[in-house]
Image (cartoon, rainbow, N blue to C red):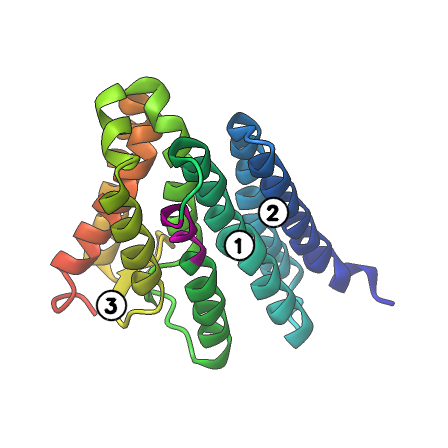
Amino acid sequence: MDIKKQIPNLLTLCNLFCGLNIIIAAAIQDFNCVIYWAAAALLFDFLDGTAARILKVTSSLGKELDSLADAVSFGAAPALVLYYFWKSEQGDGVIHFSPLIIAVFAAYRLAKFNSTTQNNNYFTGLPTPALALACFAIPQIGDDFEWVSSIINHPLFIVIFSFLGGLLLVSNFKLFSLKIGSSHRTLNILRIILVISSVMLIVWLHFFGVFLCLLIYLGLSLTFQNKIY
């Protein structure tokens, strides 16, 4: 066995391990712990691809394993975080089952991602980590902004966010990637704008800022949909 070829796969499995722990933390309603495991999952998701490029190792197994890990960490995990959070807020009922549709659409998106040719400048459909970040932030928002809490816990918001988020995952909208340094000048400017505005929002509004970052990303991508791709 070539150890070098297995390093990216090991990092991917670490991502999967973090995703499982996100689900466990959500089940016991420890949403602070969810954030730590989510941050670790995002880190390992970044590192496995980076390691594969540095070591110049790719494989069909690694590609499938990466999608499997993402389906757990950024599909099932965020869906269950919202399920357990809204169940705790709403009590028994059917409305809190709505977020589970996110996991279904995420699985479809990742399968679609593996079966099509990808462009380095943009994603077709909302990337699963982008939606997952907003999902992980939602249980934390009410601690800082009580008026926002009343909105995110409203049944209408729960249904709209769940189904609209899921549909965006499998949509044909083109959303720019964050690979700064490509030859496309306009895309690079948009990426820098997103990074700077995201840092400012997170520092100012904390987890509510994380949620707003998703809206800014969507807004920038959709505004320039027909001009830069």
> Is 179 above or below relative to 90?
below
2 or 3: tag closer to the N-terminus = 2
Residue at disc 1, secondary structure = helix
Indicate the position of residue 7 as horizontal and vertical percent values: 73, 56
1 or 2: tag closer to the N-terminus = 2
Q: Is residue 123 left or right of residue 129?
A: left
Indicate the position of residue 136 as horizontal and vertical percent values: 44, 39
Find disc 2 in the rendering and name its residue: 19
| Residue type, numbered disc 2 | Gly
Pointers 1 and 2 in contact (C-beta within 8 Å)? yes
Residue at disc 3, secondary structure = loop
Residue at disc 2, secondary structure = helix
| Residue type, numbered disc 1 | Ala
| Residue type, numbered disc 3 | Phe
User: What is the CA distance from the residue labelled 2 to the residue labelled 3?
Assistant: 27 Å
Rendered residue at 73%/54% (across/down):
10
Q: What label sits on residue 173 in the rendered view?
A: 3
Q: Is residue 217 left or right of residue 77?
A: left
Residue 183 visible from this viewpoint:
no
Which residues lie in the magenta part? 94-100
Q: Which mark is nearer the camera, 3 or 1?
A: 1
3 or 1: tag closer to the N-terminus = 1
Mark 1 neighbour density, 10 Å: few (under 14) some (14–19) many (20 or more): many
Q: What label sits on residue 76 in the rendered view?
A: 1
Pointers 3 and 1 in contact (C-beta within 8 Å)? no
Q: Which mark is nearer the camera, 1 or 2?
A: 1
In magenta stretch: residue 16:
no
> Is 88 above or below relative to 16?
above
The quarter of the image holding the C terminus is bottom left
